[in-house]
Image: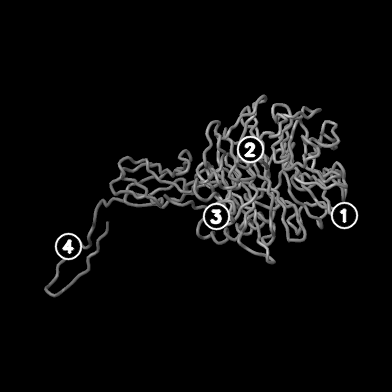
Amino acid sequence: MIPVRTTSKRYNRHFRRMAHLLLAIILLTPSLVIGGGVTSAASGWSIVDGNGATGINVNPAMRGENPAILEWNGEIYVAWKETIPSTPTISQIRVKKFNGSNWVSVDGGHPTYGLNYDVNRDVESPALAVYDNALYVIWLERNASYTAQVRVKKYDGTSWTNAEGGNPAGINENPSITALSPKLTAYKGELYAMWQEAAKIRAKKFNGTTWTSLDGGGTDGLNIAPGSGAGGPAMIVFGNDLYALWSERVGTGFSTVRAKKYDGTNWTVADGGAGLNKVSWNNAITPSLSVMNDHLYVAWVEARGGQYSTDDQIRVKKFEGSTWTNIDGDGEYGINVRTGYRAFEVQLAGLNNELYAIWSENSGEMASGVPVLKIRVKKYDGNGWVLAENGRNGGLNAFSTKTSRNPAITAMNGALYAVWDESDRTVVSIRAAQFTPPPPPSVTSVTVSPVTTSTMQGGNRQLFASVNAVGEAATTLTWSSSDVTNKVSVNATGLVTVARDATPGDYIITATSTFNRTKTATSTVTVTYAPAVQSITVNPSTDSLMQGESTQLTATG
């Protein structure tokens, strides 16, 4: 086999210089997503929030935190909470969309106030969903008694309206009890909301007009163990069912990831009855879900070595409809980049038949005496996990000395989009990045030069080949000759050797891609007769010499 050769040695140096210059220009050009297609200058991650000192905050001097991200109608939408200049400090729900080049406010564009039901009340934990061709945002908002109530609004592309069924107190099961961690998803033509309330998992559905409880309305909500505490729910549609997972405290004092599924009528346990933890006595929290290729995937954060772990691990399982299987190595450690350091807040997304996990992880580095947390990304191709941070060294952080938390991720038009909050311990900015994967590996063509050549019996000729490949396709090839007698042969470097007794004529030399053997190129080598000696003449033909004399003879053929 021979590596691809694309230029002659004479011009290699000049081409390398030009390639390096072109690559530098490409890496400095932001990737674009416009309309229905992806135009990317280069594969890998790139910051798409302006790549300046601050991100997409409405007010760069304020704290932006807890972003949520979603694709709707070919554009990326991000919701987050952002503080305003107030005493006491309160936050507003802000929303922007990314149209491929710019971030545009879609929450009214007020410099101070966002979507809050009451702009004088504090908010947190926004989440997004698409239902009935509209964008919905759900969040928690404190009332006058400082009780967190679940609020919902709907965006039709032009304006926002309340979507709480006319209830002025939000959609809590009990408006006087604080709610936590609200989530939204669409299922069977209705919008479903889930949250934690009084340590119980609560769920309601919305038909466009009215919210209806679907957790039974009892004292335990959807919790599996009566009297237990639960929190951090996540929902997703898998097959014909709605799956809900959360963290639930067991009798030993530890939390385990539990799962139920809803078929439109009934809820049933869907975790085998014992939860999904790698180790049952380790705390497990914040599950995240994704569906890809007829499998349901869940990732969560699980302590290692008991309740007081300092190196919490990212654990991952997949579910094909009946059995949950570990896909994180199934060992003591999960998929953390640095297994000895703590991980937080994992999220999942699928792209091009590969599963991506994003999370925040202690880097082991310090800045101004504070640990630096970095956004890490890995992908799973069905066999194992590999780092997927191409274009960013050591995490996605816009600034390597700042602490980043609360990542969220989604896919659109063949690319991934991630957001997170990044803090310098004074200002917290919402940062955004786009990942364009390398093209699928393929070989487009093979070329051989010269295309035609000739040599005589007993001679040789050097051929050269070039493999035009994209992605990570191998650029190696093999050589073969059409001569079954092996009198005209070719070696692994493309050198054609002709035996002295080879039959004159045309022979086909073929170069074949090792990655795709249907991609070939040929050279026709014409073998000619070696020059033959017809006669030899010696001059003079006769001569005579005396003893001790010499003479010069000349031979011609």
Mark 3 or mark 2, whichever is nearer to me: 2
**First along the sequence among labels 1 and 4:** 1
Alpha carbon distance from label 3 to label 2: 25 Å
Tag 1 secondary structure: loop
Alpha carbon distance from label 3 to label 4: 97 Å
Alpha carbon distance from label 1 to label 2: 37 Å
Tag 3 secondary structure: loop
Reply above or below: 12 against 211: below
Is 252 placed left or right of 146 in the picture?
left
Neighbourhood count class around disc 4 (C-alpha, 10 Å): few under 14, some 14–19, many 20 upward: few
Q: Amino acid at mark 1?
A: Ser
Q: Amino acid at mark 3?
A: Thr
Instruction: Where is residue 204? Give x, y as percent.
Output: 74, 31
Alpha carbon distance from label 1 to label 4: 125 Å
Residue beneath disc 3: 339
Q: Residue at x 55, y 57 (%)?
A: 340
